[in-house]
């Protein structure tokens, strides 16, 4: 799964890598948690430019009666997107890139859960495969529209397996255009993109329990607890 991640890359780098127009300065984030706003890239129509938006992390299906359901829908399994009622429409029509540059996972040990920070070996930013939805409280007149999203997960690669059996889908840059294309709605064309990222291009190291509290959002969260090492 993916329950916490970071986006500490300077905004100008994100603009260049994800081919964005001018956007406001994003705050550096070291411990992004569910229900918080996260940075997502969308293409809302064929031929339209990419845009960067803030979406609530935790997808709320359009048919939901209570937005609290989104608290339990921060992740969506790649294997069942096309059949799950909560995700199948968004899978066909509302896909996004969730911007990140690392994520946390917790390994079960005899002494408790040990958090690890996992990122690309070259420490560049990347994109999780995401889905987004619009929700509005139909019981209230002129209720605001709430836009939310979820991060897609798949089987862990060799690096992440010793820590957890699932990992977020990290899309290859050459797949961004296809994933965002609003005219593409065929699951058989999208499914091959939802694979584990190559383990040899990533690194992981243990960090302190500071990350366990969402209120801790500082560079100390990603500092190695001990000498950085490979899990191979």
Image (tube, helix red, strand yellow):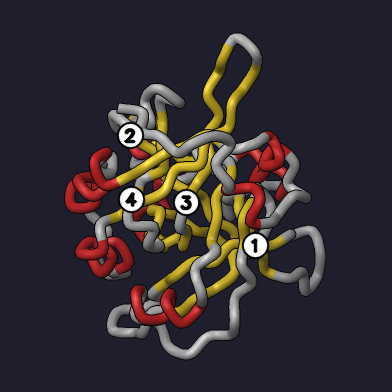
Mark 2–mark 3 Cα distance, whole angstroms, equals 23 Å
Q: Are marks 4 and 3 in contact (CB under 8 Å)?
A: no
Mark 1–mark 3 Cα distance, whole angstroms, equals 17 Å
Q: Are marks 1 and 3 in contact (CB under 8 Å)?
A: no
Task: Describe residue 175's horizontal placement relative to residue 166 as left or right.
Answer: left
Classify 10 Å Cα crowding around label 1: few (below 14), some (14-19), many (20 and above): some
Residue name at image x 73 percent, y 71 percent? 144
Q: Could you say whether the residue bearing mark 3 is in a helix, strand or loop?
A: strand
Q: Are marks 2 and 4 in contact (CB under 8 Å)?
A: no
Residue 94 percent across, percent down from the top left: 42, 62
Q: Earlier in the sequence, mark 4 or mark 3?
A: 3
Mark 4–mark 1 Cα distance, whole angstroms, equals 26 Å
Instruction: Identify the residue under disc 4.
Output: 121
Residue 72 percent across, percent down from the top left: 63, 38
Classify 10 Å Cα crowding around label 3: few (below 14), some (14-19), many (20 and above): many
Please state which of residues 224 and 194 is positioned toward the viewer in this rendering: 224
Q: Are marks 2 and 3 in contact (CB under 8 Å)?
A: no
Instruction: Identify the residue under disc 2.
Output: 79
Instruction: Identify the residue under disc 1.
Output: 37
Classify 10 Å Cα crowding around label 4: few (below 14), some (14-19), many (20 and above): few
Q: Earlier in the sequence, mark 2 or mark 3?
A: 2
Looking at the image, which residue sits at the far bottom?
22
Please state which of residues 113 and 67 is positioned toward the viewer in this rendering: 113
Instruction: Identify the residue under disc 3.
Output: 102
Whether residue 42 is visible to the viewer of this picture, yes or no, is yes
Q: Earlier in the sequence, mark 2 or mark 1?
A: 1
Q: Earlier in the sequence, mark 1 or mark 3?
A: 1
């Amino acid at each position: 799964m993916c329950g916490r991640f970071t986006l500490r890359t300077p905004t100008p780098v994100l603009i260049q890598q994800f081919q964005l127009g001018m956007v406001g300065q994003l705050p550096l984030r070291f411990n992004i948690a569910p229900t918080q706003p996260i940075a997502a890239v969308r293409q809302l129509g064929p031929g339209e430019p990419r845009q960067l938006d803030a979406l609530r992390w935790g997808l709320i299906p359009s048919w939901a009666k209570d937005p609290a359901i989104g608290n339990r829908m921060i992740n969506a399994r790649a294997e069942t997107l096309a059949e799950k009622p909560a995700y199948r429409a968004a899978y066909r029509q509302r896909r996004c890139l969730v911007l990140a540059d690392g994520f946390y996972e917790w390994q079960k040990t005899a002494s408790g859960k040990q958090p690890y920070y996992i990122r690309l070996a070259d420490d560049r930013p990347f994109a999780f495969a995401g889905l987004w939805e619009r929700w509005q409280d139909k019981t209230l007149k002129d209720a605001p529209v709430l836009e939310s999203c979820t991060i897609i997960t798949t089987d862990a690669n060799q690096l992440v397996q010793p820590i957890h059996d699932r990992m977020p889908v990290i899309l290859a840059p050459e797949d961004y255009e296809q994933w965002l294309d609003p005219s593409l709605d065929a699951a058989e064309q999208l499914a091959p993109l939802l694979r584990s990222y190559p383990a040899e291009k990533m690194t992981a190291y243990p960090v302190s329990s500071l990350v366990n509290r969402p209120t801790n959002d500082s560079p100390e969260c990603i500092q190695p607890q001990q000498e950085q090492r490979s899990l191979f």
